[in-house]
Image (cartoon, rainbow, N blue to C red):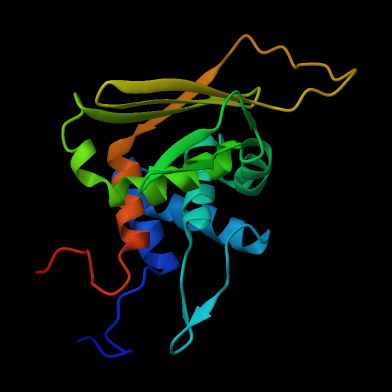
Amino acid sequence: MATEAEIYVATPKQLVEKIAEETGVPIGTAILHDRNLLTAGLRSEGQRGRGKSVVTFEDAANLLIAVAGSRNVKDSAETVRLYAPLKATAPLVFNDQGKDIVRGETFGDALAALLEALPADRDSYRDPEHGSVEVTIYGPNPAARIIWKVGERGGTIDYRPPHKRGAKRMFADLEFISKFTQVTIGHVGEMVAAEGSDPRPKN
């Protein structure tokens, strides 16, 4: 049985390293995004055990949004504030021992829910032909899409800003698209979820 000192919990540093590793973003860039989110109050400062900071699924979702959706590293916090609240055309529904759990009425919560759910159901996503998730972030007009499939079930959920009367949509002839899949979601989620045993490969 692990002692308190030996219990593994994911730290902000490990989260940054894992997201940089999975997305291919330079580690220095990911560190700056994380620092910006912490300064803006968009990453938790929770302490645990001997003062060790730990991260949540929401923290991981925010950092993924910042890394994938920011055109410039200085835009981390603004990117999360624009994209995390995007409204879903339909929520995600997870089956938990026969009970339907509804999550993801916003893009940020949907991503946090997937980060939590995939590690708990790894077998469904071992083969992309059986289980897959594709997350797409669009800009400069904030929008996102999640396409998911598990066995014979699947769906496409779009995320858009809430409609405001009189609001004008900015015209942009240039569109940027950023994508990541169940590979990143699964590995990052597994690191955040793996309390008690260190998921990192042993040397």
- How far across and down, in percent of the image, does residue 149 sit? 32, 25
- How far across and down, in percent of the image, does residue 102 sit? 53, 41
- How far across and down, in percent of the image, does residue 196 sit? 28, 75
> Can see residue 72?
no
Identity of the residue furthest to the right in this view: 166
- Position of residue 57 relative to residue 75, above or below, is below
Instruction: State the residue at coordinates (44%, 90%).
Output: 50
- How far across and down, in percent of the image, does residue 8 sit? 30, 76
Q: In the rendered image, which quarter contains the C terminus?
A: bottom left
- Position of residue 165 relative to residue 107, above or below, is above
Marker count (numbered): 0
Instruction: State the residue at coordinates (47%, 36%).
Output: 93
Residue 82 vs residue 192, the one in the foreground: 192
> Can see residue 136?
yes
- Direction from residue 98 to residue 112 in the image, left or right: right
Instruction: State the residue at coordinates (20%, 27%).
Output: 130
- Direction from residue 128 to residue 42 in the image, left or right: right
- Direction from residue 185 to residue 197 in the image, left or right: left
- Position of residue 40 relative to residue 66, above or below, is below
Q: In the rendered image, which quarter contains the N terminus?
A: bottom left
